[in-house]
């Protein structure tokens, strides 16, 4: 019968067991994943099973890493995500969280644009580290994403987004994530992108400040090509700052909307 071992096809005899397969192929493996779920006991294998064998503490090659990531996804999902090309306008609290989530999911390409540098105040909610203070955010984020998943192609643009460079930064992507801080930037990008790229999708965010209940943050379809994540109300102001939990929740709404769209599912 035919199975897949670390994403390579393999013919084995009918009635073979998991531990028998390990002992003949990866005797040092101490983590066994069968059809996307860790196996804790021996079991009989069946035709078409997908098995991944991992030796803890051993750093995999780029090819092995991709196969291991694929093993934790539903069959057929990874191939679609890998073809995705996503833009992220802004590399702050929203943008850095979206980028982390999509890289961990195995997205094929990210185009990220921001003109800011990492500051100490960013560390309360953004995916950067103390030793990156002073670095351009896009450079620091690209470095961090490469450590997570070198299989994701990351193009960065260390510049402020204006109507004059939107095509350069995001003209080739399929879905754009708006992750700006200010209302005027959000309005500029939304109006320009939806007007000039009517066949592409924009996922924006609004209302993510403070520490109100998580349950008010949701994904809403505004038009056929425009989705909004957040509560739409809670803005940053004196006494209501931006904090990691709600910013992260909204960002992961955005990232999940991207994945669902790439998988031909509704984000709502």
Image (cartoon, rainbow, N blue to C red):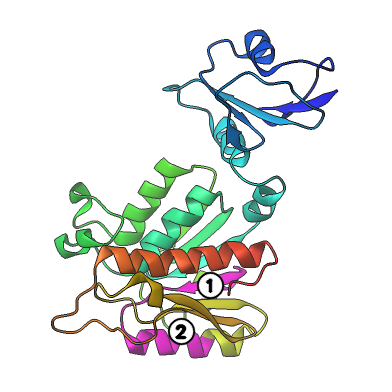
Q: Is mark 1 in CB contact (under 8 Å) with mark 2?
A: yes
Apparent side of residue 131 relative to residue 11 in the rendered image (left or right): left
Q: Position of residue 32 (x, y in %)?
A: 57, 25
Apparent side of residue 17 relative to residue 94 in the rendered image (left or right): right
Q: Can residue 174 be found in the magenta stretch?
A: yes
Quadrant in which the C terminus is drawn: bottom right
How many C-alpha atoms fall within 10 Å of the one at disc 2: few (<14), some, or many (≥20)? many
Q: Position of residue 106 (x, y in %)?
A: 56, 49
- List the residue tagged with mark 1: 176
On screen, residue 255 above or below 10 = below
CA–CA distance between discs 1 and 2? 10 Å
Q: Nearer the viewer, residue 16 or 255?
A: 16
Q: Residue at x 46, y 84 (%)?
A: 189
Q: Secondary structure at mark 1?
A: strand
Q: Quadrant of residue 151?
A: top right
Q: Residue at x 50, y 90 (%)?
A: 191
Q: Nearer the viewer, residue 86 or 97?
A: 97
Apparent side of residue 87 relative to residue 26 in the rendered image (left or right): left
Q: Which mark is residue 189?
A: 2
Q: Residue at x 37, y 68 (%)?
A: 94
Q: Residue at x 42, y 82 (%)?
A: 162
């Amino acid at each position: 019968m035919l199975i897949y071992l670390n994403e390579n096809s393999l013919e084995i005899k009918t009635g073979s067991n998991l531990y028998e397969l390990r002992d003949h192929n990866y005797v040092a493996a101490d983590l066994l994943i069968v059809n996307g779920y860790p196996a804790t006991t021996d079991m009989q294998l069946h035709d078409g099973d997908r098995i991944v064998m991992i030796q803890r503490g051993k750093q995999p090659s780029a090819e092995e890493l991709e196969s291991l990531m694929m093993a934790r996804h539903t069959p057929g999902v990874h191939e679609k995500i890998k073809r995705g090309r996503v833009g992220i306008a802004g590399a702050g609290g929203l943008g850095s969280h979206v980028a982390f989530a999509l890289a961990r999911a195995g997205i094929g390409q990210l185009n990220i644009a921001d003109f800011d540098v990492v500051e100490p105040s960013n560390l309360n909610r953004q995916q950067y580290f103390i030793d990156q203070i002073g670095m351009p955010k896009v450079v620091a984020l690209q470095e961090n994403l490469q450590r997570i998943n070198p299989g994701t192609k990351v193009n960065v643009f260390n510049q402020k987004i204006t109507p004059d460079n939107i095509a350069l930064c995001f003209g080739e992507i399929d879905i754009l994530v708006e992750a700006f801080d200010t209302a005027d930037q959000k309005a500029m990008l939304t109006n320009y992108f939806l007007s000039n790229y009517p066949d592409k999708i924009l996922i924006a965010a609004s209302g993510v400040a403070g520490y109100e209940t998580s349950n008010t943050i949701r994904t809403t379809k505004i038009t056929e090509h425009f989705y909004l994540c957040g509560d739409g109300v809670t803005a940053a102001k004196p006494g209501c700052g931006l904090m990691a939990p709600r910013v992260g929740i909204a960002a992961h709404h955005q990232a999940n909307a991207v994945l669902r769209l790439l998988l031909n599912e509704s984000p709502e």
